[in-house]
Amino acid sequence: GAGVSQSPSNKVTEKGKDVELRCDPISGHTALYWYRQRLGQGLEFLIYFQGNSAPDKSGLPSDRFSAERTGESVSTLTIQRTQQEDSAVYLCASSSWSTRGGELFFGEGSRLTVL
Amino acid sequence: SQQGEEDPQALSIQEGENATMNCSYKTSINNLQWYRQNSGRGLVHLILIRSNEREKHSGRLRVTLDTSKKSSSLLITASRAADTASYFCATDSGSEKLVFGKGTKLTVNP
């Protein structure tokens, strides 16, 4: 597709379960970002990929959070043993190397609700 | 940690009026960007201003940057109901990630 695609768009899970969130960036975009947005709040940086490498994982809140990227394309954010405070919208964005330090293209987000 | 901080947190105006939102930041930057987010949607890039620029225009948008005061403003002229959204500033300090503020929620009343 032409834009950044995220799935699922909505996920409701029980506390303690694991969840996987997927991001398909714009084709050819080398950089990929994950942000978290709690209700009514700004964006909290989680992790950044350049190609398949993650030079900056500083925003991951705990060791329950992990992310990977394969084929310089799809990325998966995994949250293990979910807690209620993990409830948020998880936003993925991508950008091209040529616009390094420039515009990010965002997906519509995956809304996670932990009961 | 938050780098950009927008104010006001919320702004309500009538259609046709101008809307001004401000952003302050703490460390030196390469560029500052403004994004818009409609309720329940992703963010859309509006405009980027580099650290060596002072003012930039795009349609009804005007952005200023004062690096000495570490602040930026976004002006939307002749606002429309469709401009109702949250607006975020984001700073690039050369660390490969954009750091976003908490946003200004703009409501334009018809």
Image (cartoon, helix red, strand yellow):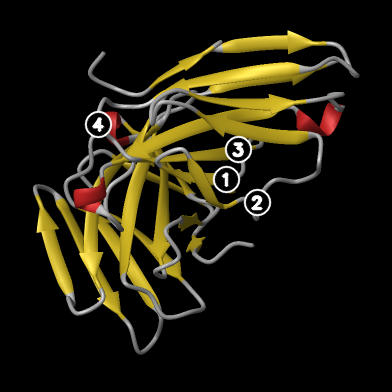
Image point (66%, 17%), residue name:
A20
Measured Cα–Cα span from mark 4 to mark 2: 25 Å
Position of B47 relative to A24 (above/below): below
Q: Amino acid at mark 1?
A: Ile
Q: Amino acid at mark 4?
A: Gly
Q: Say what secondary structure mark 4 lies in.
A: loop
Check the residue under mark 3 and report the chain it is in: A
**Residue farthest along the right direction in this orientation:** A16
Instruction: Name the residue carrying label 4.
Output: A28
Image point (31%, 57%), residue name:
B33
Instruction: Name the residue carrying label 2.
Output: A59
Q: Say what secondary structure mark 3 lies in.
A: strand
Q: Residue A11 — which label?
A: none
Q: Are marks 4 and 2 in contact (CB under 8 Å)?
A: no
Q: Position of residue A52 (x, y in %)?
A: 46, 38
Q: Label 3: how many residues lie within 10 Å, few (<14), some (14-19) or many (20+)? A: some
- Horizontal side of A55 relative to A57 (left or right) equals left
Q: Are marks 1 and 2 in contact (CB under 8 Å)?
A: yes
Q: Nearer the viewer, mark 3 or mark 4?
A: 4
Number of numbered tags placed on the structure image: 4
Instruction: Name the residue carrying label 3.
Output: A37
Q: Label 4: how many residues lie within 10 Å, few (<14), some (14-19) or many (20+)? A: few
Instruction: Name the residue carrying label 1.
Output: A47
Q: Nearer the viewer, mark 4 or mark 2?
A: 4
**Residue farthest along the bottom direction in this orientation:** B68
Check the residue under mark 2 and report the chain it is in: A
